[in-house]
Amino acid sequence: MMGKRKISSGIYLVVDPSLEEKVLLRKLEVILEEQLAALQIWDNFYAGQHVYGLIQKIVDLCHAKEVPVLINNKWEFLMDTALDGVHFDVIPADFAAIQKAVNRPFLTGLTCGNDEALVKWAQEEQLDYISFCSVFPSATSTSCELVTFESIARAKKISSLPVFLAGGIKPDNLQQLAGLEYEGVAVISGIMNSEHPSAAVQEYVKRLPKNKA
């Protein structure tokens, strides 16, 4: 059985599958010329969308560059696709049952906020990473609470999991995170809405601390 791909440090890209497919795939082809830590498909599908076909196209592009692909919440897609894992926005009701149903190694991540019980659960279940949302106010992270820097710093004291930061993160405000320990940043609009997405990735990487890029 094939082992899990690994999530590296750096840029964790989130893509919106409701974007027109040709536009989405064309942007991805350009972006994947740069190094990514991982890619997550947001569970924002529209009625009648050919989801499995789109997932496979995204996976093919990313795996050609050794970039792992995760699905947001919809873990069932792991059973019939080559997805590498799932990112949960909340603790799943029966994680053991999900692991049994998927029946293969897969990456797992969890969105955390100011409740450190979430971090402790992720550590106990040996997830692959945690993501804090929202670090700054964000138009695309409206369901997340604003996370205090103290909560992020506390996570590094009570867990050994890699930490990604998400929500409103732009190259210009990355310097405000300088005092925090983290492995990378999760970005959606800052890259996908750019007219030059490859250059946008480069700008984020340039502003990240060297050990995180």
Image (cartoon, helix red, strand yellow):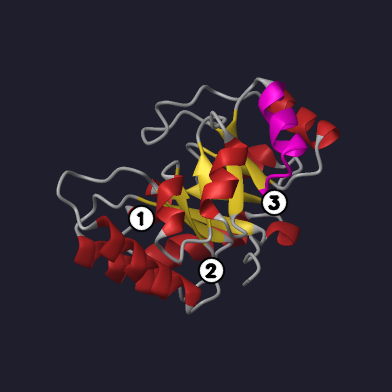
- The residue located at (52%, 53%) in the rendering is 102
Crowdedness near tag 1: few (<14), some (14–19) or many (≥20) residues, C-alpha within 10 Å: many
Marks 3/2: CA distance?
16 Å
Q: Amino acid at mark 3?
A: Glu
Q: Which mark is residue 67?
A: 2
Q: Amino acid at mark 1?
A: Met
Q: Say which of marks 3 and 2 sits in front.
A: 2
Q: Position of residue 165 (x, y in %)?
A: 60, 41
Please determine whether, in this image, residue 206 is positioned above or below residue 45.
below
The residue tagged with tag 2: helix, strand or loop? Answer: loop
Q: Earlier in the sequence, mark 1 or mark 3?
A: 3
Nearest the viewer among 139 and 202 is: 139
Q: Tags 3 and 2 in contact by the CB under 8 Å rule? A: no
- The residue located at (42%, 33%) in the rendering is 141
Q: Read off the residue under disc 3.
A: 183
Q: Earlier in the sequence, mark 2 or mark 1?
A: 2
Q: Say which of marks 2 and 1 sits in front.
A: 2
The residue tagged with tag 3: helix, strand or loop? Answer: loop
Residue 118 is one of the magenta-drawn residues: yes
